[in-house]
Image (spheres, helix red, strand yellow):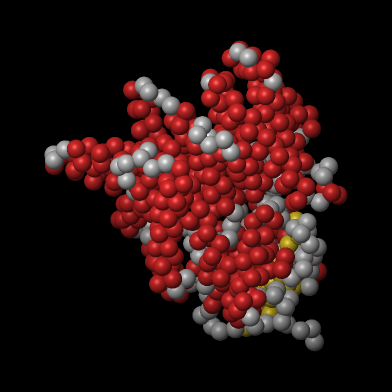
Amino acid sequence: MGTAETGAAAWKSDLALALLAALHAFAINAWAGFGQLTDAGGDNDNLLRLVEVRDLLAGQGWFDLHQYRMGLEDGFVMHWSRLVDAPIAAIAFAASALTGSRPLGEDVAQVIWPALLFWSTLFFTARAARSFGGGGAVLPAILIGAAGYYFIGIYDPGALDHHNAQLTLTMASLALLLEAPSRRWAALLSGLCAALTLAVGMETVPYVATIGVCVALLFVADPGGERAIARNFGLGFAGVAALVFAVTVPPSAWGVAQCDAFSVAQFVIAAIAGAGLAAIASVEPAAGSWPRRLGSLALLGVVLGVVVAVLFPQCLSAPYASLDPRLKDLWLDHIDEAQSLFALLVRDPARVAARYATPLVAIVLMARHLRRGGWRRQDSLVAALLVVAFAVGAWQVRGTTFSIAFAVVPLSAWIEKWRARAEASSSLGVALRLAAVWLVSINPVWTGVAAAASVAFEKGKAVADGGASDRTCQKKASFAPLGGMADTTVLTISNLGAPVLAYSGHRVFAGPYHRNVAGNLLALDAFLGSADDARAIVEAHRVGLVAICPGNVETLILTRKAPQGFLAGLLRGSVPDWLEPIGEKGSPIELYRLKQAG
């Protein structure tokens, strides 16, 4: 790896190394029996995505994003993108046709889709590392990247949520932008990937905005080398945004702005930003001198700000500012991936190491490099994304998935530098430092430290206790009794909403999604109120079954909130006379059926 590789040979080498690592991860999952397919680990999003794909294959319209089996009787409209449903559905359809089995086809799609994304992300990570640290950084990037991505879990079998696709596209945009000076088409594809990751979900807005700002500022600083890059990036970004808008938004909704999904608001902003950047880079009077370039881009920023403030002011507020206070208190504040760094420091300090250590090490490396001089365009792009991702992760822990990924790039270059020193020196101290650099750079090492600390602080007991018995109701087998019953409406907590839909034909009120306000509030009213309140809701909405999971954390939260409520009464064994217990005693999920009148 010490000699420089260029062109097609380097491309093939990176692709092959990424494939080998992806196949290794695939083999580990296969050896374990793809256990995630029957134990979703409480990830509602993966299961509801599977339900959404099934609905699409069953004939639900491309533009119809209703989830008809969740919420009140008419369901509610999900904010997810068909751009993720489509490839999963295509794989499932093809596999079902080849095997003659729909369930087997679904299993194939749940295994193949995240595996393909794992491979793609590793490939683009390797390409980014090659541009940043040379050919010698590729192998370290593959190794520490594969280890980090594998243990994060977003590429596990069954991982159908869109976060893995977003990370793949964002890493692709970065890698292509790093290559742009030597490849004319790279900037256009980088803009394409940036627009796609934005269209998949609004979580990547900070990273897309950071990439766009970096492209613009690099153009201001170096018009000769960056002018064509800025133009092509802007054209790719605006063009794909227009295409996505036409393909994923129905004509009847072209004038409806949505802040949590790709709509006219995101399209207009992307079109103005992309086309404006391309125009400024193409017109000589605007690009002639750095004051003109900076002034033109500042004017473009003002135009974007005015457009947002005048046409889409609702999107300037916090994402969940309008959420019902009860849902914020009893749901949002307890979502694991929405916790902040400061909350983790108080509630689970050991986990901080697993999520924040390697990005922080990478930031320190970049800061030391800046202080020593020799700053490059590659450094600007990687450092900007890394710092922004770390800030997002400090706000919500879900952002650390991106910061861990971006950290791989400078860490792999760091490893390569020490490897070169060790190769040139026979010093034991240099060899030990290289070993230490490797250990510090591998995120699962920090995960192991965090796990050991958790055990030391006796915070791993709940996880260990929940394995075999499924006290928290996360395994497919726990829902088998429900799957064998005639379809009806099930009153249950939001954490069980998506599993009920995925493992049975029933419908539910509650599910952990911010657009399902009415359904979630109705379930809260039933469980927190008295037994008589619950009965009125059950009868008014034709509920056939009540399902509770005593060991689920949401159940514990609700019973603490209302110790005299309907749910707390069921846990105490106080079953009202209009319900009768059914199913096996001691099952993780306790089922109750309404007694027939008369």
For the point 55% across and 29% down, the residue is 214
Residue that sits furthest to the bottom in the current view: 598
Q: From what the image shows, is residue 346 above or below residue 531?
A: above
Q: From what the image shows, is residue 277 above or below residue 487?
A: above
For the point 58% across and 67% down, the residue is 109
Q: Position of residue 126 (x, y in %)?
A: 43, 46
Q: Quadrant of the C terminus?
A: bottom right
Relative to the observer, which residue lies in front, 18 or 54? Answer: 18
Q: Is residue 28 left or right of residue 424?
A: right
Question: Can the viewer see residue 588 in this picture?
Answer: yes
For the point 56% across and 84% down, the residue is 584
Q: Position of residue 75 (x, y in %)?
A: 77, 62
For residue 307, which quarter of the picture? top right
For residue 256, which quarter of the picture? top right
Q: Is residue 334 left or right of residue 28?
A: right
Relative to the observer, which residue lies in front, 507 or 273? Answer: 273
For the point 37% across and 23% down, the residue is 374
Q: From what the image shows, is residue 529 above or below residue 346?
A: below
Q: Is residue 191 left or right of residue 578?
A: left
Question: Can the viewer see residue 342 in this picture?
Answer: no
Q: Position of residue 115 (x, y in %)?
A: 50, 61
